[in-house]
Image (cartoon, helix red, strand yellow):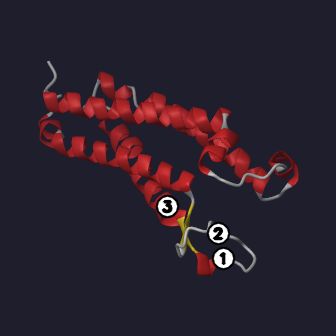
Amino acid sequence: MRSKKTNALQMAVLISGFLFIIIGIAFLFFPLSVLQFFAENVSENWLDLVRDNELVAPLFFMVKAYSVLLITSGFLMVMPLFDPLKYRGIVYFNGLFFPAISSFILIKNSFIKSSNLPLGDTLPQNGSEYFTHKVMLTCGAVFAFIALICAATLILTSKEAREGKE
């Protein structure tokens, strides 16, 4: 019989896996739709940029490859459901370290100070000194949430894990 603390860890693992799969599928099959949902100005000729731009094309396909990694990581998060003690390392790496580092990178770089932009670049006229990449901020917040729930449940179950209990 598993404890309530272990059940909390398993719930965090399920939520993490589900969010990884959803984000991965969204970026793999509907990357433009995801970006259009967050962006106000999407170029009409974005497909031409993906085909022949030496910066945009690799970034586009790297995002698609990254989305496959998220999907497989989401399915990997099923492993700790069967044996939470044995697969605790997966929760540390896939549920804590990866989302924590990713959220830091995404949130830190989602805010751009307008004085750092080249002349001629336009910002939304909201009176703010900063421009925000909403898609990066949202993904960073989701990853931060995953890291927090996994960290909390790993701390919650640490005593039982040291004792070898589930």
Q: Which residue is mark 3?
A: 105
Name the residue at 37% across, 33% down: 15
SS at mark 3? Answer: helix
| Label 2 with label 1: CB-CB less than 8 Å | yes
Residue 123: mark in rendering: 2
Residue 8: mark in rendering: none
| Label 1 with label 3: CB-CB less than 8 Å | no
Separation of residues labelled 1 and 3 (CA atoms):
19 Å
Residue 18, quarter of picture? top left
Separation of residues labelled 3 and 2 (CA atoms):
22 Å
Which is in the foreground here, disc 2 or disc 1?
Answer: 2
Separation of residues labelled 2 and 1 (CA atoms):
9 Å
Name the residue at 70% across, 70% down: 122
**Residue 68 shows in the view:** no
Name the residue at 53% across, 62% down: 110
Q: Is residue 3 above or below residue 23?
A: above
Q: Which residue is mark 1?
A: 117
Provide residue 128's location: percent of width, then percent of height: 52, 72
Circle 1 crowding by C-alpha within 10 Å: few under 14, some 14–19, many from 20: few
Q: Is residue 11 left or right of residue 60?
A: left
Provide residue 40's location: percent of width, then percent of height: 66, 53
Q: Is residue 72 above or below residue 65?
A: above
Provide residue 153's location: percent of width, then percent of height: 23, 41
Provide residue 49's location: percent of width, then percent of height: 83, 52
Q: Amino acid at mark 3?
A: Ile
Name the residue at 48% across, 65% down: 108
Is the N terminus in the top left, top right, bottom left or bottom right quadrant? top left
Pointer 2 or 1: first along the chain: 1
Q: Is residue 39 left or right of residue 108?
A: right
Which is in the foreground here, disc 3 or disc 2?
Answer: 2
Q: Is residue 153 left or right of residue 26?
A: left
